[in-house]
Amino acid sequence: MKFFSIATLFLAVFLFGCAEPTERIENKLTDYLQDDLKFMVAETMKASKSREGLLDTPYYRVKDFRLFDGAEARIYAAYAEVDFFIYKDISMHEKRKYRYDVNTRGWDRYKKELKFGKDTLR
């Protein structure tokens, strides 16, 4: 019985030690979102051959961010839903959804879609 308790304690410490800190997960998301924003702007400029239709300062807004725990966090530890605003005169933005993969310790974009409407917070 004592062995079971020690083994359980060791397993709990090991699993807790392998969990990535929330701050690091959030920092990785920020880096990933910055790269996505740069790519979106570059692709739009390449397609239109100018920067004319873009905002002076394109930006994104995190609409939803959740950390998972327990059984829910075995594969994905976090979720984020983000709106990207890059167009000046078009009332449209791109919504992207991300999840943090525990095994690769990285963010994965798994959905993107265009939505009509401007940023409601500006």
Image: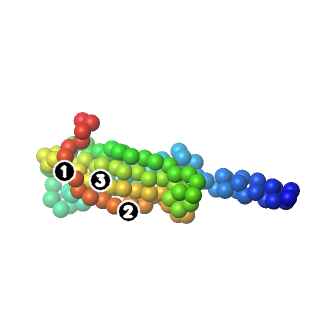
Residue type marked 3: Lys
Which sits earlier in the primary sequence, circle 1 or circle 2? 2
Which sits earlier in the primary sequence, circle 2 or circle 3? 3
With respect to residue 56, does 41 lie above or below? below
**Residue 95 disc label:** 3
Residue extending furthest toward the right: 2
Q: Is residue 44 visible?
A: yes
Q: Is residue 42 visible?
A: no
Q: Position of residue 28 (x, y in %)?
A: 47, 51
C-alpha gap between disc 1 and disc 2: 20 Å
Q: Secondary structure at mark 2?
A: strand
Q: Secondary structure at mark 3?
A: strand
Using residue 47 as the reference point, say whether residue 106 is left or right of it.
right
The residue that disc 1 covers is 116
User: Which corner quadrant holds the N terminus?
Assistant: bottom right
Within-10-Å neighbours for mark 1: few <14, some 14–19, many 20+:
few
What residue is shown at x 19% (from left), y 50% (from top)? 116
Q: Position of residue 79 (x, y in %)?
A: 44, 53
Residue type marked 2: Tyr
What residue is shown at x 81% (from left), y 56% (from top)? 6
Which sits earlier in the primary sequence, circle 3 or circle 1? 3
Residue extending furthest toward the front: 1
C-alpha gap between disc 3 and disc 1: 10 Å
In the image, 102 versus 35, the foreground residue is: 102
User: Which corner quadrant holds the C terminus?
Assistant: top left
What residue is shown at x 72% (from left), y 58% (from top)? 11
Residue type marked 1: Phe
Q: Position of residue 106 (x, y in %)?
A: 49, 59
C-alpha gap between disc 2 and disc 3: 11 Å
**Residue 110 disc label:** 2
Q: Are marks 2 and 3 in contact (CB under 8 Å)?
A: no
